[in-house]
Image (cartoon, helix red, strand yellow):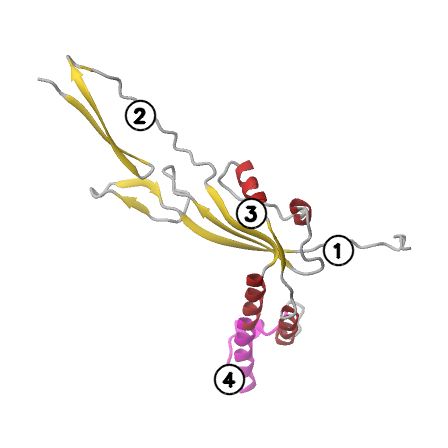
Amino acid sequence: RRKNLVINYEIHGSSGSLKGEEVEGHLKKTIDLSYTPVIAPLIVIEKATYGLTQEGINSKISDIQIELYTLSAIANRKSLGLPISIEDNAKLLNENGGLRIPHLQKKLEAANTLKEGFVDVSKIIQQRVEDSGGGKIDIGSDEDLNTLFGVNPNPGSPKQLRISYTVLGHDSERMTHSNEITYPSGFPRNYIMPRQDNHVAEAVERVEQVGEGGGGG
């Protein structure tokens, strides 16, 4: 009696079936299925900007306003003679011991004068990802971003590197925070669903100091 070899498989979230007919204990045709479980790049940059976007400005203003509201509430309780914790009392002071609320009020005034100015650096960041093997975003704090991106989009103003990215689904070892899907049988399926995220890094503009012997026309 003839027999068939039937193989049901799932690769990278896609299922399929292979069927081979047997003759005298041998397959009539060779079954050959191969797949390289490598996704390159694993990280896809959706958008990356360097400079100061309106979103970045709004975020700065919002963060300052939230902290001001929190500290004002603490200061108000303290002025009324109500007990406050040691931690809350410490929040009212800067690292140098000065009052933080006036400092934040000045920061808020400055933030409201910020102007938008940025460049799209998505392609450059994507190339960095691919140069690193496709699985990480690696930009050191010692790198000059103006040199890396070839421009200073907002001279003299605070800048941010804002990156929106997607980590693609993959069927190798767990590398994201997503939950694994399971088969109906309950056995774990080694496939990680995609996820999206954002990262914002503040850029510090270093100003070269000119010594007494420095030139000046």
Quarter containing the N terminus: top left
How many neighbours does mark 1 have within 10 angstroms: few (below 14), some (14-19), or many (20 or more)? few
The secondary structure type at the circle numbered 1 is: loop
For the point 89% across and 52% down, which residue is it?
Answer: 215
The answer to which image quadrant residue 55 occupies is bottom right
Residue most extreme to the top: 24
**Mark drawn on residue 52:** none
Circle 4 or circle 2, nearest the eye: 2
Q: How many angstroms separate mark 3 from mark 1 (CA)? A: 26 Å
Type of the residue with mark 3: Ser
Magenta residues (range): 66-94
Q: Is residue 95 magenta?
A: no
Tell me whether circle 3 and circle 4 mark residues in contact (CB < 8 Å): no
Circle 1 or circle 4, nearest the eye: 1
Percent from the top left, x then y, of residue 120?
Answer: 59, 51
Type of the residue with mark 1: Val
Residue underneath mark 1: 207
Residue underneath mark 2: 33
Residue underneath mark 4: 82
Tell me whether circle 3 and circle 1 mark residues in contact (CB < 8 Å): no
The secondary structure type at the circle numbered 2 is: loop
Q: How many angstroms separate mark 4 from mark 2 (CA)? A: 74 Å
Tell me whether circle 2 and circle 1 mark residues in contact (CB < 8 Å): no
Instruction: Looking at the image, tell me whether mark 1 or mark 4 is earlier in sequence order.
Output: 4
Q: How many angstroms separate mark 2 from mark 3 (CA)? A: 37 Å
For the point 53% across and 41% down, which residue is it?
Answer: 129
Residue underneath mark 3: 122
For the point 57% across and 61% down, which residue is it?
Answer: 56
